[in-house]
Image: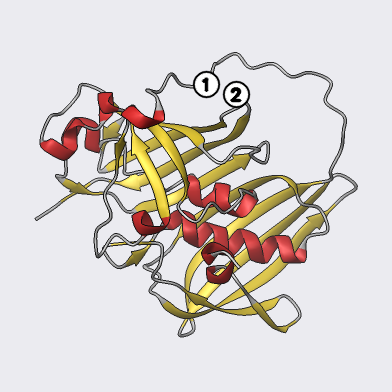
Amino acid sequence: MNLLDKDTSLTEIKPHHYQLTVSDNWSISGIPNGGYLLALMANAMMRRSDKKNTPILTVNYLSRTEPGDAEIFIEEISRSAQFNRLQARLTQNGKEKMRAMGTFAVETAECFIKRYEKSPPAISPLEDCVAIPEMPTYTLYGRMDARLDPACAGWMQGRLTEQSEHKGWISFKDSRPHDAISVALVADAFPPPLFASQGLIAWVPTIELTVNIRNIPQTRWLKCIFRTNFINCGLLEADGEIWDENGELIAISRQIAQFRKIA
């Protein structure tokens, strides 16, 4: 079993009620990564839904989730011939930490139009990109091989850019194949793009994350780009695109986060 599968495993103790352990294997400074937490919620909702296709996932992070025991409660909001809509609540010690919504579509071979008005991001070859190093308290990068394009990686040596943009490649170090669960993780696996223009001056806790999964990747490596255009009133957005090596759009995302100066 791959590590992510182990760390997103669930035990159903009652109908629509799951026990789990939030792992420290996907953390940033000891705090479980938001994409990993969304992957947990998505897995629970997909266990409940008889439709699995093109998930649209939105999660609100209400307070800090810690590594350790947790529970997830699933509620079906609506069901139709095309869609299931579900709600998930994650609690620890009786306190709600996260609430997510998921919309799951029926699988269909029908695709009346396929039109991409944007191309995959132009990213330097994999061997020329800068690997995000493994660090003792950044366990996420011990599991994920994330490499930044040199054009946006200068902040790691104090060289900043004019644009708050990160683009690069990502895969699992244990070569785990991708699925909807892993795409949810990837959507929050790069450092905040504002680091490229501002450096490590701020803590950027996520308030809300939405991931719209269009396809399941068919390649090991994924090409990602994340861009922040507006920072004001202590808030910012990060818009993302995830593509596979075949030029297929995998997912689009939007994250709303706080901009908090490091003391």
Q: Within 10 Å of the Cα at label 2, are there few (<14), some (14-19), or many (20+) other Cα atoms?
A: few
Q: Hey, which quadrant is residue 61 in on the image? A: bottom left
Label for residue 108? none
Q: Is residue 108 left or right of residue 189?
A: right
Mark 2 or mark 1: whose residue is earlier in sequence: 1
Amino acid under disc 2: Gly
User: Which residue is identified by label 2?
Assistant: 247
Q: Secondary structure at mark 2?
A: loop
Q: Quadrant of the C terminus?
A: bottom left
Q: Label 1 belongs to which residue?
A: 120
Q: Is residue 158 left or right of residue 132?
A: left
Q: 103 and 130: which one is in front?
A: 130
Instruction: Tell whether 162 sits left or right of 189.
Output: left
Front one among 117 and 131: 131
Q: Amino acid at mark 1?
A: Pro
**Residue at x 43% of width, y 47% of height:** 188
Residue drawn at 56 percent across, 47 percent down: 183
Dot 2 and dot 1 residues touching (CB under 8 Å): yes
In this rendering, the answer to whether 157 lies above or below 52 is above
Residue 162 is at least partly visible in this image? yes
x and y, in percent, of residue 66 in the image: 38, 74
